[in-house]
Image (tube, rainbow, N blue to C red):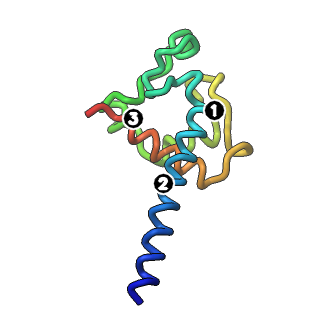
């Protein structure tokens, strides 16, 4: 019984770590060029398009997970250059991005 629990725990931890890596990889591949590595949007495109700093506590508090998920899936109504990713990412990948975005909050 202890061995099964240990294996299950190890598998769960490995899966969680893999999901984090996946979100970071997705961020790097699809989001970083505009939003920057830290969500501050201090990139050429971020500055040009006046993209919001997602690391700001006020932004983090104002935006719900559902709202973030919708913008990723459907695109932004505020910035037409933010295209929909619903056909490029799975719902699980979108959820992992939402969780990743939450880690960008300034301490």
Q: Position of residue 79 (x, y in %)?
A: 59, 23
Q: Position of residue 73 (x, y in %)?
A: 63, 43
Q: Secondary structure at mark 3?
A: loop
- Residue 30: which numbered mark, if any? 1
In what quadrant of the picture does the N terminus appear?
A: bottom left
Q: Residue furthest front?
A: 3
Q: Which residue is mark 3?
A: 104
For mark 1, does the 10 Å Cα neighbourhood hold few (<14), some (14 to 19), or many (20 or more) residues?
few
- When the figure is inspected, residue 38 is found, relative to residue 14, above or below; the finding is above
Circle 3 packing at 10 Å, graded few (<14), some (14-19), many (20+), is some
Looking at the image, residue 92 sits to the left or right of residue 64; the answer is: right
Q: Secondary structure at mark 2?
A: helix
Mark-to-mark CA distance, 2 and 3: 17 Å
In primary-sequence order, the first of circles 2 and 1 is 2
**Residue depicted at 49% across the width and 27% down the height:** 37
Question: Where does the C terminus fall, quadrant-wise?
Answer: top left
């Amino acid at each position: 019984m202890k061995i099964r629990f240990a294996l299950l725990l190890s598998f769960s931890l490995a899966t969680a770590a893999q999901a984090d890596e996946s979100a970071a990889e997705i961020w790097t591949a699809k989001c970083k060029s505009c939003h920057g590595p830290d969500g501050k949007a201090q990139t050429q495109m971020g500055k040009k398009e006046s993209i919001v700093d997602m690391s700001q506590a006020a932004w983090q508090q104002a935006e719900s997970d559902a709202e973030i998920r919708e913008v990723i899936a459907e695109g932004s109504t505020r910035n037409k250059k933010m295209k929909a990713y619903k056909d490029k990412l799975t719902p699980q990948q979108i959820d992992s991005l939402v969780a990743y975005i939450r880690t960008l909050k300034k301490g």
